[in-house]
Amino acid sequence: MDLYYEDYASNTDFYTLNDFIFQTGSAYAAMLQQEYDLKRAEMRADRQEDYVTFSHDWLQTQTIQITKSKEEGDYYLLKQKPMSFPFDKWDIGIQNIFPIGAKFTKELIRDSIDKAWQDDLLPSTKNVFWSLIQNKVIVRCNSSIISPPPFIRVIYVPEISEDLEIPNSRNAAITTAVISMMRKIVDEGHLVKTTNNQNKNPNPVSESDRNLLNP
């Protein structure tokens, strides 16, 4: 019987804690993408040229100290990466960046890494520009009288990770979505568990449900 269970798994044996974690992350990403698409559609309908903003319950903050490097320039290393969205060229996963401990208190100006070369051609200002590369916030000043702040406060929508905290206001909706997705997989019933052992299973792609084989 032990050998039998190594080759087959029932529907109720399919899910593990990792499956729930994966489906929760999928539901979180789907809800964010849905809100992003909705607001993009509204902006296009109104012919607005602006960045998509999210309600405050999606947002988290982190405070980061500057890193100075002769090779890479000045940057801030994020503790947690922001969410990314398809076709987004402005890194709207980061909503705002504010200086801490600097002589100026103006919000840092969003920039695109592809257009950063234009900053040197602009008239001297007291602005600090930022752009995102992976988990680094790159900053540039186009005036010698301004230097990047020693610390920044980043307001962002966090990506899916082990440190992700689901907003309390979204718990019920995400839980419902996860249960619905997992019940749908069970109800379909044919693909039960991906093979993860060295047994010679009848189906080379996936293990079969013994209840379906012996109705």
Image (cartoon, grey):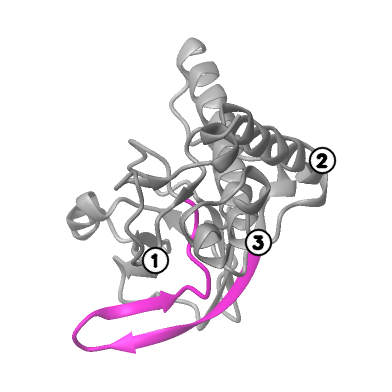
Q: Which residue is drawn at 39% across and 69% down?
A: 135
- Image quadrant where residue 130 sits: bottom left
Q: Compared with residue 146, is residue 154 higher up or lower down, i.e. above or below?
A: above
Q: In this view, does 194 lie to the left or right of 180?
A: left
Look at 53% across and 41% down and name the residue there: 209
**Residue 107 visible in this rendered orientation of the protein:** no
Q: Distance between the residues labelled 3 and 1?
A: 19 Å
**Callout 1–callout 2 Cβ contact below 8 Å:** no
Magenta span: 61-83
The amino acid marked with disc number 2 is Ala
Picture disc at residue 197: 1
Q: Does the magenta stretch include residue 67?
A: yes
Tell me how far mark 1 sits from mark 2, CA to CA: 36 Å
Image depth: mark 1 or mark 2 in front: 1
User: Mark 2 sits on what residue?
Assistant: 172
Badge 2 marks a residue whose secondary structure is helix
Is 130 situated above or below 118?
below
Q: List x then y, in percent, for residue 30.
A: 55, 37
Q: Position of residue 65 (x, y in %)?
A: 51, 84
Q: Residues within 10 Å of mark 2 (few under 14, many from 20)?
A: few
In this rendering, the label closer to the viewer, 3 or 2: 3
* Chain-order first, disc 3 or disc 1: 3
Residue 26's tag is: none
